[in-house]
Image: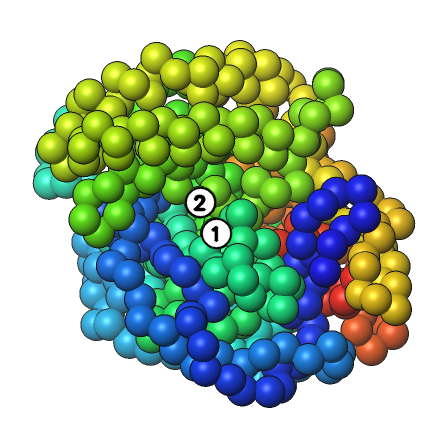
């Protein structure tokens, strides 16, 4: 389907049930796998995976179904100075009558972390619906490389990080049938909802949390994080459940690929890409989160900058191919060509303008659409969220969070770049009370706001907001 006035594919068809099975070339053309060692560096990095064989996939029919919330599998391990939990798998489902039980104040850090993690997943499952179960591989351990290391003090400032286990790009021949956009890559958890047989078994999200952080955990004795005499300095104490939900939302794809991949002064919409044989391919497929971002000062979609850079580097890739250069053997020379290209100048403009001007970049998400008889989609209502663009580029935070000041003390607080210290999740107000549920009732779904859910819906997730209509 085409969206009138935008010339992009609508990503709302996760609400359409898959029906007729057929065998043809794979719906996913290629994927990029997570470098797991990059998680603790704050910005997950990826590399192209070997080419996939063609598989069977289901052709979507245009029939909407009510999708009940699905299951989330947690593969959890923990090591702290006073405790350790062996790797264990737990299943959380919204169909469970009650949320996972709280730990006790007397329990060890690892037991508290595990129970709190399960409760965070339960909150997510109440507002994000997974027809196909997803798996989270999570670890709680010290980010300090070794005792008495000079870097240990700095490492304590990092509470945690998470990212999709892989990004998947769909074959352009079948993207329209699936209701996805072949110009962008999709996180594993979301790609699995569309073509579960083509997403490799295993984890969809990788998450690490720092056992050395000064954490507070909700317990049966203290559920909401109200002040206690033994809380030390409340400005330095962080609710573990807040951190878990925040990072898992990054793992679900709430992350932009506009980043300083190769130079602190240049912003590119993705990293450079090469084939299995070493052929330089230009730019890797940008993340789906990029799609609805806009430069509010000029009224320019960020995708226009993205397309400009992509086209220039695609031409460069063809030129490099004609010279017989490969990424493995001519890496330095290719990088010099990239740096001297017009794409580099566009990247500088994005860095010096939209990315480092307060309030300049907005995420515009469709709120209502109209679908004609010939399946043409017209957006009838667009709304926006202000993204985080401080005057100095903030590694790992700029463009991948809601604005820090604009959303302070609002129901969107969870996706600000900074954790809210000194309070538990249930002790923080306001909570979201205005979600209009799939079954027609108003719901109180806690701390995850409408704008955050609308962003996930624009990416293609089924949410408590219901389908776009």
Query: Mark 2 sits on what residue?
Result: 285
C-alpha span from label 1 to label 2: 6 Å
List x then y, in percent, for residue 444: 77, 64
Image position of 151 (left or right of 221)? left
Few, some or many C-alpha atoms within 10 Å of disc 2 (few <14, some 14-19, many ≥20)? Answer: many
| Above or below, comparing residue 166 to residue 348 in the picture | below
Which quarter of the figure is the N terminus placed in?
bottom right
For the residue pair 110 and 403, the one nearer the viewer reads as 403
Q: What element carries label 2?
A: loop
Based on the displayed image, in which of its 4 quarters is residue 58 positioned? Answer: bottom right
Identified at 26% across, 47% down, the residue is 275
For the residue pair 28 and 409, the one nearer the viewer reads as 28
Query: Mark 1 sits on what residue?
Result: 185
Which quarter of the figure is the C terminus placed in?
bottom right
Identified at 80% across, 70% down, the residue is 437
Based on the displayed image, in which of its 4 quarters is residue 159 positioned? Answer: top left
| Above or below, comparing residue 355 to residue 252 in the picture | above
Identified at 39% across, 25% down, the residue is 260
Q: What element carries label 1?
A: strand
Few, some or many C-alpha atoms within 10 Å of disc 1 (few <14, some 14-19, many ≥20)? Answer: many
Residue 418 appears in the rendering: no
List x then y, in percent, for residue 174: 55, 66
Image position of 202 (left or right of 441)? left
For the residue pair 359 and 17, the one nearer the viewer reads as 17
Identified at 31% across, 46% down, the residue is 46
Q: Marks 2 and 1: in contact by CB < 8 Å?
A: yes
Q: If you read the primary sequence from the N terminus, does the residue marked by circle 1 or circle 2 appear first?
A: 1
């Amino acid at each position: 389907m085409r969206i009138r006035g935008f010339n992009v594919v609508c990503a709302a068809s996760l609400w359409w049930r898959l029906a007729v099975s057929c065998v043809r070339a794979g719906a996913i053309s290629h994927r990029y796998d997570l470098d797991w060692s990059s998680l603790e560096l704050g910005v997950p990095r990826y590399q192209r995976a070997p080419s996939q064989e063609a598989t069977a996939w289901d052709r979507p029919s245009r029939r909407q179904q009510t999708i009940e919330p699905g299951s989330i599998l947690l593969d959890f391990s923990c090591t702290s100075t006073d405790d350790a939990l062996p790797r264990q798998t737990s299943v959380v489902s919204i169909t469970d009558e009650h949320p996972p039980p709280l730990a006790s104040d007397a329990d060890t850090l690892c037991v508290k972390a595990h129970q709190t993690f399960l409760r965070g997943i339960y909150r997510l499952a109440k507002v994000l619906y997974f027809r196909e179960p997803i798996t989270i591989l999570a670890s709680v351990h010290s980010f300090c490389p070794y005792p008495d290391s000079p870097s240990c003090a700095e490492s304590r400032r990092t509470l945690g990080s998470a990212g999709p286990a892989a990004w998947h790009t769909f074959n352009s021949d079948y993207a329209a049938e699936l209701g996805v956009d072949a110009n962008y890559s999709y996180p594993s958890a979301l790609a699995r909802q569309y073509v579960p047989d083509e997403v490799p078994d295993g984890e969809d999200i990788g998450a690490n949390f720092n056992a050395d952080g000064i954490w507070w955990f909700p317990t049966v004795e203290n559920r909401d994080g109200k002040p206690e005499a033994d809380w030390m300095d409340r400005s330095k104490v962080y609710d573990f459940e807040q951190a878990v939900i925040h990072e898992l939302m990054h793992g679900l794809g709430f992350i932009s690929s506009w980043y300083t991949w190769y130079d602190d002064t240049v912003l590119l919409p993705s990293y450079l890409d090469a084939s299995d044989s070493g052929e330089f391919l230009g730019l890797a497929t940008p993340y789906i989160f990029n799609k609805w971002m806009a430069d509010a000062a000029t009224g320019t979609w960020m995708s226009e900058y993205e397309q400009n850079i992509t086209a220039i580097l695609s031409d460069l890739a063809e030129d490099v191919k004609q010279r017989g250069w490969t990424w493995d053997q001519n890496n330095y020379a290719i990088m010099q060509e990239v740096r001297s290209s017009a794409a580099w100048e566009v990247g500088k403009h994005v860095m010096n303008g939209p990315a480092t001007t307060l309030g300049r970049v907005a995420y515009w998400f469709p709120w209502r659409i109209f679908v004609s008889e010939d399946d043409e989609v017209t957006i009838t209502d667009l709304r926006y969220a202000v993204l985080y663009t401080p005057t100095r580029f903030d590694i790992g935070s700029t463009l991948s969070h809601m604005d820090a000041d604009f959303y302070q003390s609002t129901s969107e607080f969870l996706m600000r770049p900074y954790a809210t210290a000194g309070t538990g999740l249930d002790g923080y107000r306001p909570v979201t009370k205005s979600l209009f549920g799939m079954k027609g009732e108003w719901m109180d779904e806690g701390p995850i706001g409408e704008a955050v859910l609308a962003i996930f819906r624009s990416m293609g997730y089924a949410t408590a907001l219901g389908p776009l209509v």
